[in-house]
Amino acid sequence: MHDDQLHIDLGIARRLIVEQLPECRDLPVTALAGSGTVNAIFRIGDDLTARFPLQGLDAAEVESHLEREAAALGEFRRVCPFPAPRPLMICSGGHGYPLPWSVQTWVPGEIASPRGLSGSLEFAEDLVRLIQAMRDADVAGRVFSGEGRGGVLRDGDEWVAECLRRSTGLVDVDRIGALWARLRELPYADTLVMSHRDLIPANLLVGDGRLVGVLDGGGYCPADPALDLVAGWHLLDDGPRAALRDRLGSGRVEWFRGAGWALQQAMGLIWYYADTNPTMAELGRSTVARLMADEELGALVSAD
């Protein structure tokens, strides 16, 4: 998926697990075939997962990142109203894999999909419960880190311009560009909240029509309250999405800013993963389709 992607296969993973987790030497190790783009994930027995970063040149930097991720995940677990992985340990590379890697607990459930529960009001209520729990958490005087999404929309101008250029022929880049031009002008948030920062289907587990687990909480930190609203665009159709907006009390500016974050993320998925990760590319397409079909957003562009 990435030009600098590292090689990690089942054989290497099993050798590293047996060496560094001797208590697991008799447990089966299974490579998980998923749409993940940051880590290769292997299940250890019934209760654990090993996560191997797919990119990185400096082992010390990666280890520092994994330590921060574990701390954030631990904090996220304490406020999340649904099961989430528990960080257990950071291990060393070897056998041709050069980076540190991490071990977490396994959370059962099926990976959500953009259409699977898109018409469910109950699922929308679960997402409200998740987002509200994070909004109610204590920011403890912290500010946005400046890394990734969650600060100021217009900081993504250069990235969106590249996405539009690379997506010519894949989507209606003129109309999407016009929408971005309006959304990027919105006032930025004057109050931050605690945020998951990546509420895409791949990070949400479902079962029996409900949300049953949340993955990848290692990015949990203060951010724009609108950022987690991307879940509505990634996962819900009009009715449930309107219910999510209403229950969270999102005003027009916050809701539109959430659409801006969703557009910024989705446009990157379409072209970047077009040939290497069809699931992620299709997520980008479906999210952009929802955004472009929305009447309020359409009116925003038509106002020009």
Image (spheres, rainbow, N blue to C red):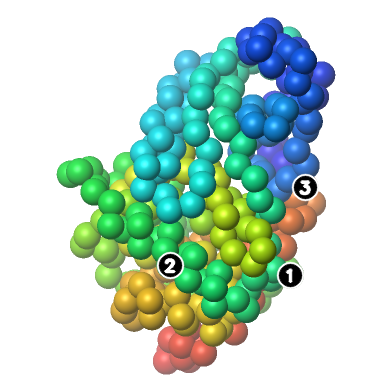
Q: Amino acid at mark 1?
A: Gly
Q: Amino acid at mark 3?
A: Thr
Q: Which residue is mark 2?
A: 128
Residue visible at 47% across and 55% down in the picture? 158
Which of the 4 quarters of the picture holds residue 248? bottom left
* Residue 87, percent from left and from top: 49, 29
* Residue 284, percent from left and from top: 64, 63
Viewer-nearest residue: 178 or 290: 290
Residue visible at 39% across and 31% down in the picture? 71
* Residue 31, percent from left and from top: 77, 33
In whole angstroms, how far apart are the C-alphas of marks 3 and 2? 32 Å
Residue 282 shown left or right of residue 290 in the figure = right
Q: Nearer the viewer, mark 3 or mark 2?
A: 2
Residue 85 shown left or right of residue 256 in the figure = right
Residue visible at 78% across and 30% down in the picture? 30
Q: Quadrant of the N terminus?
A: top right
Q: Are marks 1 and 2 in contact (CB under 8 Å)?
A: no
In whole angstroms, how far apart are the C-alphas of marks 1 and 2? 36 Å
